[in-house]
Image (tube, rainbow, N blue to C red):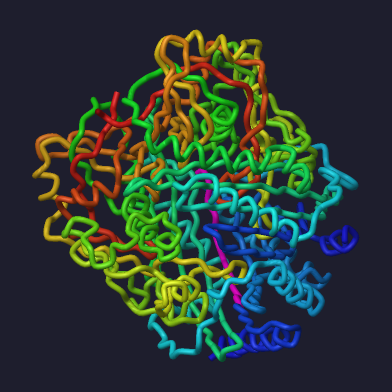
Amino acid sequence: MLDLLKSAMMGAPGYAEIRYHRRVQTAIDARNGTLKRVERRTLAGAGVRCLVDGCWGFVSTTDVTLEGLRKAVIEASDAARAGARLRRDKARLAPARLGKGEFVYQACVDEPGIAEKIQVVLKAEQRMREASPLVVGSIVVYTEYADEKFIVTSDGAEAHIVDRKPSFHVFATVGRGDERETGAKAWGVTGGWNDLMKKRDLDKMVDEAVALAVRKLDAGYAKGGQYTVILDPQLVGVLSHEAIGHTVEADFVQSGSVVKGKIGEKVASDLVTLVDDGTMPGAAGMVLVDDEGVLAERTVIIERGVLRNYLHSRESAAAFDTVPRGNARAFTYRDEPIIRMTNTFILPGDSRLEDMIAGIEHGFFLREMGQGGQADSTAEFMFGVSEAYRIERGRIGELVKGITISGQAFDVLKSVDAVSSDFELDLGSGHCGKWQPAKVDAGGPYLRCRVTIGGRHE
Amino acid sequence: MSGEGRVMKGLEISEELVRRAKAMGADEAEVYYLKARKLEAVFEKNDLQVPKGDSYEGVGIRVIRRSRQGFAATNVLSGETLDDTLAAALAIAEASPVDPNHVLPDPAEARPVSGIYDEASERLVLEDVLDVGRRFVEAARAYDSRVTIDSASFAAHISERAIANSKGVRLSERASSFVCVGMAFARDGDDISSFDAEYSGSCALAGIDPEACGRRLADKVVKALGATTIPSFKGSVIVTPYAGDELIVQPIAFSSSAENVQNGRSKWAGKLGSTVTSPLLSVTDDPRIPAALGSASFDREGVPPEPIELLKDGVLGHYLYNCYTARKDGVRSNGRATGTDQTTPGIGPTNFVVAPGQTSIDEMIRAIPKGLIVNRFSGNLDPVSGDFSGVVKGGHYIENGEIAKPVKEVMIAGNIYELFAHIVAVSREVVTIGEMRLPYIQLEGVSVTGK
């Protein structure tokens, strides 16, 4: 395949890149006593990108014969040439360490067949229904991407990639009279079925989702306002990824995000070091070679409170006169690589979680992401929280529901006064959306900080 | 007609695969075929980023064997991969439990909807698409130099879909869509407005006005400059059409989906014929509006949909059905199966039309002593309980019947199903956003958290 791609781009003007990507996606969705859907989708084709006269052209096709690929190369270079008449800011590419050879992200052993996976999902869904008489809705979903890629660039990348990213979502709805509450758990990895099962115990997650939903029926609401809180590793991941991470993506920086021109400035508490690292083994955002053929490396975004680096593609790295470290990613062959995070996290500190809680007079202990959430280039964010507990005089108290947190993410990081020694990447179940989805992961330790809680007025 | 031969080809592939599935042991089989061409110009940071082209062709194969369903899809239409895909669909059926509600529909007449295919799309080249995108970006920038187009795109989609099943359904349709969408913010010194979006969509190229769309976007973000915080209060909120998707359309579509009714997640289970919202709210789901983006003569399963009144003066009239949920309730599918060749049928509305009210927007604002206009809602709404909470983007504070100032760091919260009972005004003005037609809707009793 690599030889075919190389022949197809011979004679292409300027820079050319062909990425053949075959994805077999499996989804198993059981809900409410039925197997709602099992789908296996094969999506395969080539994405061809050309850079001519400082402008990109991108053409995707299912025709991966030599003739079909050559046609796509011509169409992409013609489109680039036409676009170059419009484009003012000419794209250049930074030199990069390019991937050559075989990249098998995680060896998968004893991968079960579809029939066994269906049985496990059905059993978990049954367990959820039987966990409480209050359960009125039960959903268990398994999703898996099995990817194979061949990436060739005209300046020397030649990578063959084998990657598999499975995830589980469990979602319980309970009812009492007219009231409805939900509880959800989700996790994902890079690896096989057995790696996913090792990350979390499926039965335990089902039980916890139901128990949380049931407890929410009797939970009250909180009064909105500013509070000192503990964020768990998953929420630290949400903050690191959604609220901070997007603002340091170089394309967002170029359009004027809040950190534009702030490299070298103090943007967070001394206790905070935040990185993006595609090489974390088994994390759901694991990328060893990105979709421009660039080898992944750790990027230190914030070092002890000081902003050090943005995240780059080869194009943005040239504009900022720096090096790319594997953050140009495409979801399918039909998507062109854009700047994305991989695994984004805060490094652990040396505080003990118990001491951090004990130091709060009046606040909240916040656990896991709820529904919804968004952040923008100002780093203003809002996220739903799945579980929130009051902290009064250093002790964890009752559950409250309907909680969202908001604030300006760098202000939140400046307010950090304790970082625990725990560490977990725990955001691997879903997708990050930025024109196209991407599998990412994020996390860190527990943080103590100040946020705005959105609740209800009593 | 130049496109006719290709549609025939899609139907032929589908019928052939239905035959092969039957030969391999399926009791029933359905093949959904999609062929699509997409041309797109993507802009970032006020500049062209990339022109893009995509050619796609794929099939989704659904089989039913001894009341067990299997599904597999592929966009590799070679003999070997098609055989593998058929075998995968049957293997999934084999491993799945019996469910007698898996049924395929019988054939029914599907009357074409006019205006959903623009013949001009066949002659379109990438340069035309680049030009429309350029006009959008330039119009927004020319409106005010403080505006930054963070990202924008203009895309033309031309599709041919076909469906065949073992009961004799045999349908095909062509459609085109043109969509201009942009996300922008304004920056004046250190003052950065919140992001806002604007959208223009049409089935015909001539239906797109990129300059007007660009100016609307620029106007929104410039007006959001100089935003200040406000104190908390509980009161009137005007939900604009752009915020209406999340706050109005999604909860109604969720709770009227037969699937959510059957699985206990809908608040509106058992409420057909009952009042579920204020009498000021009426909603029609209409798949037959000429030249509308949500129109189609048949759904994902080949069932022709008809317009239905979801809400009539606040009374729930219908649920949205596909074949599976209809069989469960012992009714006929009303043709609301959604999805593509790569997915099994889901459920969703077509063109979601909220009926206009009696009040003009100006009258609505004049009658509010203290309130908030929500231009965009960025938050979380749990469609099961109805609880929502989130940040208001591009919000404006209303004081003594006038728009006083743009606001920032304001959150709203409440329960949307409770608030549906407290709709106090619906505007005469209606905005079309994609498949939605929405007026401005005034809710009473929303918690507004400021600083």
Q: Nearer the viewer, residue A134 or B64?
A: A134
Q: Quadrant of residue B98?
A: bottom right
**Is residue A319 shown to the viewer in this render?**
no
Instruction: Specify the segment rendered in magenta.
Output: B33-46
Q: Is residue B44 magenta?
A: yes
Q: Is residue A101 left or right of residue A77?
A: right
Q: Magenta segment, principal secondary structure?
A: strand
**Is residue A392 shown to the viewer in this render?**
yes
The number of numbered badges drawn on the structure is: 0
Q: Is residue A429 magenta?
A: no
Q: Position of residue A370 (x, y in %)?
A: 48, 38
* Image: A63 above or below A447: below
Q: Is residue B415 left or right of residue B81?
A: left
Q: Nearer the viewer, residue A108 or A348?
A: A108
Q: Position of residue A344 (x, y in %)?
A: 64, 31
Q: Position of residue A261 (x, y in %)?
A: 55, 24
Q: Nearer the viewer, residue A275 or B331?
A: B331
Residue at (59, 85) in percent of width and height: B165
Q: Quadrant of residue B426?
A: bottom left
Residue at (72, 43) in percent of width and height: A196
